[in-house]
Image (cartoon, helix red, strand yellow):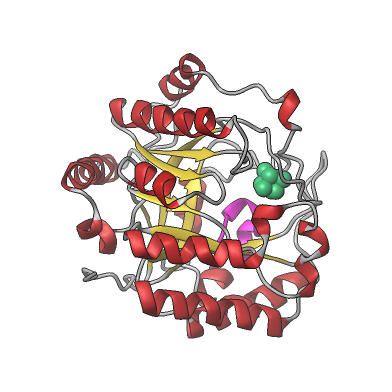
Amino acid sequence: MQLFSAVPERGLVTWSPSVTLVPTRGCFNACTYCSFRVPLDQARPLTLEQAAAELRARPAAAEVLLLSGEVAPSSPERAGWLARLVALSELALAQGRLPHTNAGPLSLREMARLGRLNPSMGLMLEGLGPAYEPLHRQAPSKRLPVRVGQLQQAGRLGIPFTTGLLLGVGETRADREQALWLLADLQRRWGHLQEVILQPWRPDGDQPQPLTAAEQADLLHTIAMARELLPPEVHLQMPPNLWPLERLPDALDAGINDLGGIDVADVINPAYPQPAVLGLQELLQRHGWRLQPRTCVHRGWWSWLPARLRLRVEHTARLLASATAQANLPHG
Ligand code: SF4
């Protein structure tokens, strides 16, 4: 498909005002680092009434991130789980929001169905190499061929897609380079990877554990490598709550140009508070960067969307631009 001015503008840093809904924390995987998951028999699925109340509480959040635990493909619960994702996507659209689903690997039919409702979707590659194997021994859907197959499937379906790497779990620089080459090859083949998240792994707990100077230097090297290896239209994203705020300009200088969806809290890393958007804006301005809200799908991929979704995205983008022009950055 044809990309439209997809190459990011220099000096511009984007973010998406978002609210995260968790359809269920129940997950049949058991990744060793995960504190989000609960066993399937203890999960309490989010009802539509609860979801509607959460959306009402966050009127300025343009993106609704549907971040879900996973049900096994062969489970009799799978159809109900998918129906909830569809219903929540429809609810988001009905409230004038844009859903972005990240719910693990999907069948072709499941992904196509959600793709008609979600302007963009996502699935982390996480990484490749021996460091990831012990983390995912009890997580069948984290196997590399499954993840790569999902990225290819999203490409075949023409769904603007977010993926990323989980960094700092013991992988080598050579592992990271290989993973970035893999993503670059997928992008050259399909063109659908609108953004790649470079996510530092951070330990859970009551207190945040900031990245050390050595860890920051190592990640800056990887950001620069990603910028060099990935095609220029791919946005490079860093979650701003996982990186020291005063060093954020260094990450931008190395190649980061997107801060992802910013909610009032991070459901995956709850000990790491989200920065205030106005404070971010002031910091970045001082360093010569312009912070701008965006929709969940970057502009270069709008032409890929079904007409109904594209109109929704364009309308939302106008609202965000108008809020910015009035110096009334969405934060709620
Ligand atoms: S797949 Fe996601 S929710 Fe499930 S255990 Fe792994 S990290 Fe946790």
- Relative to 199, does residue 281 appear above or below in the rendering? above
Please indicate, yes or no, whether residue 80 appears anywhere in the rendered image. yes
Q: Secondary structure of the magenta portion, mostly?
A: helix
Foreground residue among 321 and 315: 315
- Relative to 211, does residue 321 appear above or below in the rendering? above
- Relative to 186, does residue 16 appear above or below in the rendering? above
Query: Whole-percent x and y of residue 15?
Result: 43, 52
- In which quadrant is the N terminus drawn? bottom left
- 21 lies left or right of 14: right
Determine the image quadrant of residue 127: bottom right
Foreground residue among 238 and 141: 141
Q: Is residue 240 magenta?
A: yes
Query: Whole-percent x and y of residue 296?
Result: 37, 49
- Relative to 215, does residue 111 appear above or below in the rendering? above
Foreground residue among 56 and 13: 56
- 231 lies left or right of 273: left
Query: Whole-percent x and y of residue 184?
Result: 47, 79
Q: Is residue 196 magenta?
A: no
- Specify start and end residues of the magenta stretch as a single range: 238-248
Query: Whole-percent x and y of residue 273?
Result: 65, 42
**Point 49% across, 38% down: residue:** 66
- 170 lies left or right of 89: right
Q: Which residue lies most toward the top here?
A: 49
**Point 57% across, 70% down: residue:** 251
**Point 56% across, 61% down: residue:** 238
- In which quadrant is the C terminus drawn? top left
Tag count: 0
Please indicate, yes or no, whether residue 285 appears anywhere in the rendered image. no
**Point 48% across, 47% down: residue:** 261
- 250 lies left or right of 55: right
